Each structure stands twice: as structure tokens, then as C-alpha cells.
Image (cartoon, rainbow, N blue to C red):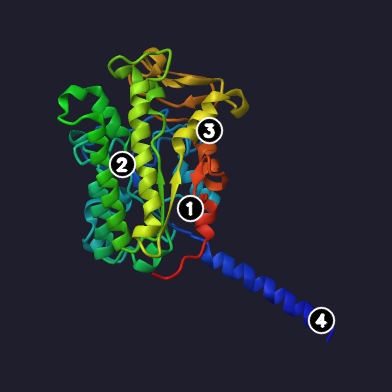
Amino acid sequence: MERFPQLVIFLSVFLLFSAYANAHVKSLIIFGDSLFDPGNNRYIKNCTIQANFPPYGSTFFHRPTGRFSNGRTVADFIAQHMGIKFQKPYQKLYGKNLGSIIVKHFPVQAHGINFASAGSGILPETNKYAGVTPLEVQLQQFQELIHYKHLHRDQISKSIFFLEAGSNDIFTYLQAPEKSTLSPIAFVDSMLREAANFLDIIYQHGARKIAIFSVGPMGCIPGRINLPNASTHRCYAGANKMTKYYNYGLERLVYSIRRKYRGAIGVYGEVFNTAQRLRVRPKLHGFSNVNSACCGAGPLKGRVQCGEKGYTMCSNANEYFYWDYFHPSEHTYELISKALWSGGRYAIRPMNLRTLANITLPHS
């Protein structure tokens, strides 16, 4: 009889932890561009925006994977925080075989899938002729997986949806603003309409946990030297101003989710400010250089892509904030992902990804 109370306590604790484990999200469905692309572009014929050659991937994977990094991306680190495998590229799993007998009985893996395409935009026209997959088409791929019963509503409702997009649109606009019929504000407003449409579509198909990430400080990347009037000595204020306006609109969209979409919750990942906090105190975070790229050529190593003819590479990539002309190093991604996973409101709001993954939502 003395053991009975202990048994009750043990069973209570066991059931509590079991309920917690069952509530924990174990799947990510990812949309975006090169900051999240796990290698989709390498499977797209005639796509010219690639990272499928050395020294990409050299730090962690020890081979090129198609990721625009020396190692893992933010999406990879978040998957590790969740205790799940990396999400595989949609193009590798399905590509042009979707709907054929080859993949007829091939469901999406339990830990999710990644549609992100390097160089893509939130606007369909961005880098259209480079063969990338814009957000509009990524959404079509998502809907086709549902149509062919490879992705089921139960998994969708238990996944976290990631969106990180907009940097390529802003950069392309700033390369030749005179060619656009829109002012910077009007251009960003058109981007925000696409983001709102994205939310509508994924919600209609069952998404209930959504994370939208801001664009980082575009005016500070080494590749800014390819923009008119940009300086090698300081961040390009015009690019950062346009980026901040876009990010402000994204955050407003996120805060509309609880009101507009019954049973859903959204979080806003403040990548811009998180990145700037790292750059302001570099030594504290292990950086020796927060201005130029580790790998590339030209001023700031921002003129030539890493791995292309004439490039040079630093001796320790993870002492650099930037890996190449456009993308952070794996070390930077790791620090940003940690802030997004468990950080406070300065990094992500109204809650961090760890809380979002474990929160139980009411049925809609």
C-alpha cells in the first residue's frame, strides 16, 4: 500500500510529459529564398543561381549541398532545436515527377518539407529569367502535394510554417530603381500584398502556426557595392530604409493573424535587429570581421560570388559575419537561430519558436 501513492505520482508525471511530447511540433513547412534553401535550385534544370560547388558547405557538410552557406542555415538549426531531421528539398523528392506513378505513394516526410529557392522573390517577376522558383510557384507546389495526397491536413495543422522572403525583390529594385514604374513605398506595398496572399492560402489549407521572418540589413551586406551610390565604408542607408519599411509591414501582418484567422497564431522573427545587435558587438559574439565576406572577390569580397573565378577565402569562416557577398556564415546563422528559438521580444514576438512549438491551440 505504501507504494501506491508513489505509483500515482509516477503515472501523473509520465502522462504530463507524454502530453507535452505529443503537443510538441515535429514538422516544418518552409518557404523562402537562399537563406532557407537546402538545395532546391540544384535540381532545377537551367537555374543559374547555384551554390552546388566548393567551397559552399565546407564547414559542416564537407561538401556542397546547394545551401548558400559554409554550413547549416537558420532552418537547419531550428530543426535541430526541435530534435528533428533537416527538411529535404521539394525538388529532390518530387520535382517533375509529382503526380506520376514514381511518387504516387510517397508521402511528405513526418518532419516536413522545404520549398525555398535561392534568388526567388516574394514577387513573381524577381529573377524570373534565372530559373528560380518564386513564392507563388512554391505555394502551387504545396497545394499540389495536398491534391495528390502526399501532404495531409493532420500534418499541416501540426506543423510550423516558415516564410523568409523579400531580400531579392528589394535588391533587384535598388539595382535599377529608374526602370520601375513604382516608388520604393509602392513597390514594398506590392510585396506586402503578396505576403498577405501567402497567409490566406496557407490558412485555407490548414496552417495554424506561422512564423514570418524579417529581411536582414540589406544595406550592410558585402554585395551592396553592386548597388548605385553604395559605399564600402558604411551601410547603404537607402537599402536599409526600404527594408525597414517592408519589415514594419510584415510585423503588422503577423499581428493581424489572431484577429483575421480563427484558431491560428503568428510570430514575427526580428532578423534585422538581431543581426545588427551581433554586428555592433562583434568580439562578444566571436567575430573578427562584420563588414566583408569570407569568400569572394573584389571590394568587401562582394563583387564575385564565392567559388567563382578569382575568388579567395578566409582561413576561418565562422569568424566572419558574412560568408559570401549576400549570405551570413554558419556561425551567424547559429546565433540568429538561437535568438529565434529561445530569445526574448527583441528577437521574436509575441513569443519565441520554442513556445510556439509547444503551445496548444484551440481547434478552429
Q: Residue 85 carries which label?
A: 1
Kind of residue indicated by mark 1? Lys
Report helix, strand or loop for mark 1: loop
Q: Is residue 245 visible?
A: yes
Mark 3 and mark 2 lie on one chain; the one further toward the N terminus is 2
Q: In this picture, is 120 found above or below 281?
A: below
* For the residues bearing labels 3 and 2, Cβ distance under 8 angstroms: no
Crowding at dot 4, Cα within 10 Å, few <14 / some 14-19 / many 20+, comes out as few
Q: Pointers 4 and 2 in contact (CB under 8 A)?
A: no
Relative height, residue 154 to residue 64 (above, below): below
**Does label 4 or label 1 sit earlier along the sequence?**
4
**Residue at which label 3 appears:** 331
Q: Which of 158 and 215 is in front in this view?
A: 215
Disc 4 versus disc 3: distance between alpha carbons? Answer: 51 Å
Instruction: Count neighbours of disc 2 (C-alpha within 10 A) and say few if under 14, some if 14 to 19, many if 20 or more.
Output: many
The earlier-in-sequence mark between 4 and 2 is 4
Q: Which amino acid does label 4 sit on?
A: Arg
Residue placed most toward the observer, 210 or 289: 210
Say which label, 2 or 1, has the lower sequence index. Answer: 1
Image point (39%, 34%), residue name: 68
* Dot placed on the residue nearer the N-terminal end, 3 or 1: 1
Question: Residue 180 location, x and y as percent?
Answer: 17, 28
| Mark 3 vs mark 2, CA separation in Å | 22 Å
Can residue 66 be seen here? no
Q: How crowded is mark 3: few (under 14 residues within 10 Å), some or many (20 or more)?
A: many
